[in-house]
Amino acid sequence: MSGRLVTIVTLVALLAACGTAGRSPSAGEPPGTAGPGRGSPGVTTASRAPVASPSPDPSAPPWTQTEVSEWGGSMTSALAFAADDVWAAGTVDEGEALITHWDGRAWREVAPPVRRREVFFRLLAASSRDDLWVFSDDGRAWRWTGTGWAARGGLGGTTGADGTSGTAGTNGTAGPDRTSGTGTSGAAGSGGLWLRAAAVAGPRDVWTAGTTRGDPARPFLGRWDGSGWSEPPLPPGAEVNDLGALSPRDVWAVGRSGGQAMIMHWAGERWDPVPAPPVPGARGAVLDRVLVVSPDEAWALGTAEVSDQERRQFLLRWDGSRWREAGPLPQGTRLTAVESDGHGGLWAGGESRGAGERTILHFDGAGWTYGRTPGTQSGPVVNDLARSPDGDLVVAVGGNPDYDEDSEAWVWTRH
């Protein structure tokens, strides 16, 4: 298949049937105090949880695969605003950038803002369907106007809509037939960034995080205020791996600092540290992903170093006043993506280790289950998950990177 236009009959039928994508603590305060805007959140320390074995759910609807590219591709990011408004981004055909949109009838390619094989659209992020952004792996950003892409620059200056260095402001709009534009210089160095995370809190409040590509590399945090990018300072030794936002006054950042898991919260004026529960028996830990659902629900996925040979993942949950371990994680899958199920539970995707049907799991707050996932490829890895807020449609995107040029970029759906 071409890999440039995805129109799969089974997915069309499936989606058509659906009918439808401020917590400011002060260090040193005791645990158990109030949460957002109400004091300092506390921490619950959990004992080391045993490894859980997920159970099959024979009543769960199966996941259906849509093949985006037959070779050399991987989808990396997804957003679902409704069952007829789903976005996905990644690469196909060994490096061709792809942004595609589901309109309720078919997946159709959206003209990218930069027509260059070297550009990798790593992340999609939005505060609403009218405030959608796409970010390249070198930190450039574009905002969707409804008909095309408007360049929004990025730290470093390699921000023009044609992929060249830009020096001006934000007036470079790249539409379906327009590939020229200008960008915004930044403080992190031209073309020297590796983007890890992005979060859109609003049209004038966007955050990015990652590391520079220099030697030595250093972590960076970028902020768009509506007119340009700045680089707010990070605490010494801090590194941000993921970001999540509900509003300009409610943004979370997770990563590590000093070899331990790090959580920070932005309430509109500054980044405040939030204590993370220690992982019993671990000598170091890092948080890799954060999912912000509401002021009273957020999740963070991390990895703890138990010994030179042993690493184990752990899951934290924010309940509005504190972070605590959410219970044992499933055996046999390395989790790489999380998404809310809309009912206080969690969808989690990852890389299955010898049990392909366990690539995507569901956590209801008490235990883990799994359903049938497509078995047409080897080594699938879920890079992102998205759920439609107006129904039960769930979208997973990924590839099988162990197979390099043979990797298939794919989209899985269930309802």
Image: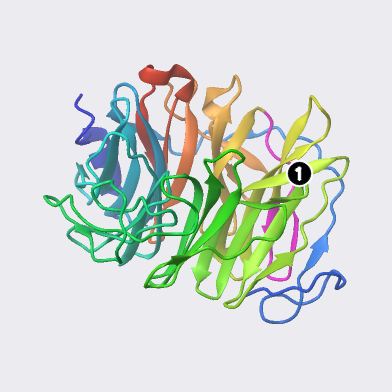
Mark 1 residue type: Ala
In magenta stretch: residue 328: yes
Q: Secondary structure at mark 1?
A: strand
Residue at image coords 32%, 21%: 71
Please name the residue that numbered disc 1 is placed on: 285
- Between residue 379 and residue 58, name the one nearer to us: 379
Q: Is residue 70 above or below residue 290?
A: above
- Between residue 61 and residue 403, name the one nearer to us: 403
Q: Is residue 2 above or below residue 14?
A: above
- Between residue 329 and residue 210, name the one nearer to us: 210
Colouring convention used in this rendered image of the protein: rainbow
- Between residue 41 and residue 97, name the one nearer to us: 97
Q: Is residue 305 visible?
A: yes
Which contiguous range is marked in magenta?
316-331
Residue 156 x %, y %: 43, 53
The reply, left or right, for residue 62 in relation to residue 340 is left
**What residue occupies the far bottom of the structure in this picture?**
38
Residue at image coords 79%, 24%: 309
Q: Is residue 292 above or below residue 352?
A: below
Q: Is residue 129 visible?
A: no
The reply, left or right, for residue 12 in relation to residue 167 is left
Residue 168 x %, y %: 29, 64
The reply, left or right, for residue 4 in relation to residue 285 is left
Residue 335 x %, y %: 60, 37
Residue at image coords 19%, 36%: 5
Q: Which quadrant of the structure image shows residue 173?
A: bottom left
